[in-house]
Image: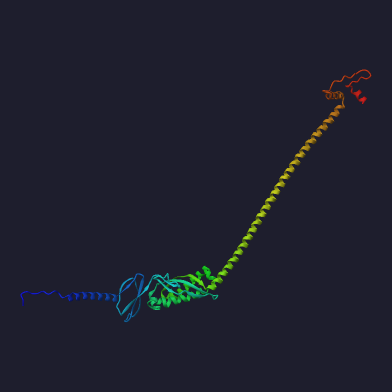
Amino acid sequence: MSAYQVKLPPVPGAAFRWVALAVALFVGFIAVYASFTVYVRPDELAVRQVYFGPNKGIHPDLYGPGLHFVMPGYERLHRFPRDLRLLEFNDDKTTASATSSYQPSIRIQTSEGYQVTVDVSIAYRIVDPYALITTVGPGGLYETSLMIPRSDKVLRQKLGELNAEEFYQGDLRRQKAVEARSLLQDEVGSSGIQVWNVMVRHYTYDDRYQEAIEQRKIQDQTVFKNRAEAIAAAREAEKNRVIAEGDARVQVEQERGRAEVKKIQADADLYYRKRVADGDLLVALAEAQGTKLENQALQVAGAGNMVGLKMAEVLDGAQVIVVPTDGGDGSNPLDLDSLIRGW
């Protein structure tokens, strides 16, 4: 043997075997971990089922979100969603979401025999997974075996009570939707499902029925329009009558006022004429009394002198005439006796 020892490099296969062993152990650990644990998501609840042994069967205990240990082949955790779910009866699936389950739109025959296609959304949630799995079964059987067939039956029953005209009336549709929710809750409530709402989103008639109903609606609107116009005309006539009566009353009151004014004026004129006549009578009586007194005064002694004075007043301002007062043709104008005899 040589004094020099030759060191050989390590065999590459040994390192590979160590790496392969580590990978195998890791994969085995992952496989065992996955086999012995179940992860329940935050929006889920789980129910434990034991396949054999003294605890065989479904256990009522609920398992919330998190990682749970299970024995493969001996037990299993059945997971159920606990968030709000939507069951859509709609031919259009473009609005589908992760929490929606779609079925074709419901074809309902109304009480008149018309065909109506209705889109309905049903909102519900699982509140008791134990009751659900014991009455319906695991997995998605709550949809295929419970919610879908029961919802279809209830919707046909309640919405089928409407006639074609009543589908146009929103309050009646909502009332039937409320009744459908209550009836559906009665049918699925014992299985641990709570029905939140039943919403009638859209409805369409067959073309021929749609046209007939639209024509009927147009006729009804025409009748309503004519009735409204008749009422408006009657109210307009009543308004004109009231205005005419008001104008007539105004004219009557005005004529009454003018007549009252004329009466007052006539009374005033009568009173004025009466007072003037009374004044004239008093003046005439006073003048007559004065004349009477003058006559009486003329009949007493010395009245001739007074007459002479009056005559002098008459001759006041007259031209002076010289008249002979003596002789056979003489005349004394102041001798009243001779003047009277001469007349």
View extreme (top): residue: 327
| Image side of residue 111 versus residue 101, left or right | right
Percent across and percent down for residue 227 are 61, 64
Quarter of the image with the N terminus in it: bottom left
Residue drawn where x is 38% and y is 74% of the image: 129
- Residue 217, placed above or below residue 306: below
The answer to whether residue 163 is visible is: no
State which quadrant residue 113 falls in: bottom right
Residue 75 appears in view: yes
Q: Nearer the viewer, residue 46 or 103?
A: 103
Of residue 243 and residue 119, the one placed in the foreground of this image is 119
Q: Residue at x 36, y 71 (%)?
A: 44
Residue 150: name its quadrant: bottom left
Is 140 placed left or right of 264 in the picture? left
What x and y, as percent, mark residue 327? 93, 18
- Vertically, is 40 above or below 246? below
**Front residue of 13 and 151:** 13
Q: Quadrant of residue 216?
A: bottom right
Total marks placed:
0
Residue that extends furthest to the right in the rendered view of this protein: 328
Quarter placement of the C terminus: top right
Question: Residue 176, how many percent across, how many down?
Answer: 50, 71
Q: Does residue 227 sit above or below 28 in this rendering? A: above
Camera-side residue of 209 and 265: 209
Q: Name the colouring of the figure.
A: rainbow
Looking at the picture, how far across and down is residue 88, in whole percent?
44, 72
Q: Residue at x 79, y 34 (%)?
A: 283
